[in-house]
Image (cartoon, helix red, strand yellow):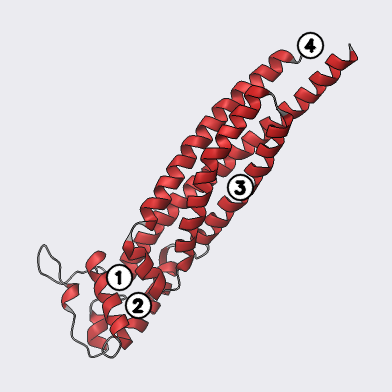
Amino acid sequence: MTTLDPAVACIKYIIFAINFIIWTLGAVLLGVAIWIKSDGGLWEYTDNLDIERYYYACYICMTAGALILIIGFLGCLGAAMESPCMLLAYFILTACIIILEIAATVLVWKIAGGDRLQNVLSEEIKWHIERRPREDNSRRFLDLIQLKLECCGAETFLDYQKMRQDIPASCNSDRTNNINIRSCGENLRRYLEIRGGAIGGICVSLILVKLGAIIFTICLFFAMRQEAKSYNGQ
């Protein structure tokens, strides 16, 4: 035995632990992406507002999550079998997944949050309010968003009165039958920030953990090569 054996064993156990964390986070990412994608309202919002990046991010995260479940197993198997080829494949695939996760994070965090995001959304909702009297698509979209998010108007329910329109029945609360006070720009911003924050947070966590996995995989790869050289030299 060479003096590298204990180090190799330690690195292998670390890789097993890291891959278990990656596998768990990958399953969470896949579940969250499916949960967000299954919300029919998201398609309506992206179809009528300039926020389609959220929809694309769901597909990227679903792909990344599914691949992570497979690649995590490959990393554990490669470490257990001490196979340089499998470790190299694991390294390359993990780097590709990191790129996908960075892309998803950029998509959901591309527009600044808070007031800037709310202002962008409010202006686009106002555009639909202006066309509501003559366009069925805008009317249907406003009714859907006001019912689903329990809101009214772009910035306030007075937006309808400013444009000389009657306040639609979809602005009324099902519980109290009063007009919802919160604006759709504000409630939609919160809706997107919660989902974007969940996707971005999980992706960032995965990226950091995977960087650790890559470092230890490289260490194991070179330790195995050094061990093989030492064995052949004897």
Whichever of labels 1 and 3 marks the residue nearer the N terminus, that label is: 3
Tell me, yes or no, whether the two marked residues, 2 and 4, touch with CB atoms within 8 Å. no
Spatial separation of the CA atoms under disc 1 and disc 2: 8 Å
Q: Is residue 52 visible?
A: yes
Tell me, yes or no, whether the two marked residues, 1 and 3, touch with CB atoms within 8 Å. no
Q: Please tell me whether residue 84 is drawn above or below residue 197 in the rendered image.
A: above
- From the image, state whether disc 1 or disc 3 is nearer to you: 3
Q: Where does the image place residue 52, in percent across and percent down from the top left?
A: 46, 68
- Kindly identify the amino acid type of the residue bearing the numbered disc 4: Thr
Other-residue count near label 2 (Cα within 10 Å), few / some / many at <14 / 14–19 / ≥20? many
Q: Label 3, on which residue?
A: 98
Spatial separation of the CA atoms under disc 1 and disc 3: 35 Å
Q: Is residue 153 visible?
A: no
Whichever of labels 4 and 3 marks the residue nearer the N terminus, that label is: 4
Q: Where does the image place residue 182, in percent across and percent down from the top left?
A: 25, 68
Please give the label number shown on residue 125.
Answer: 2
Whichever of labels 2 and 3 marks the residue nearer the N terminus, that label is: 3
Query: For the residue labelled by badge 3, is the local secondary structure a helix, a strand or a loop?
Result: helix
Tell me, yes or no, whether the two marked residues, 4 and 3, touch with CB atoms within 8 Å. no
Residue 131 appears left or right of 214: left
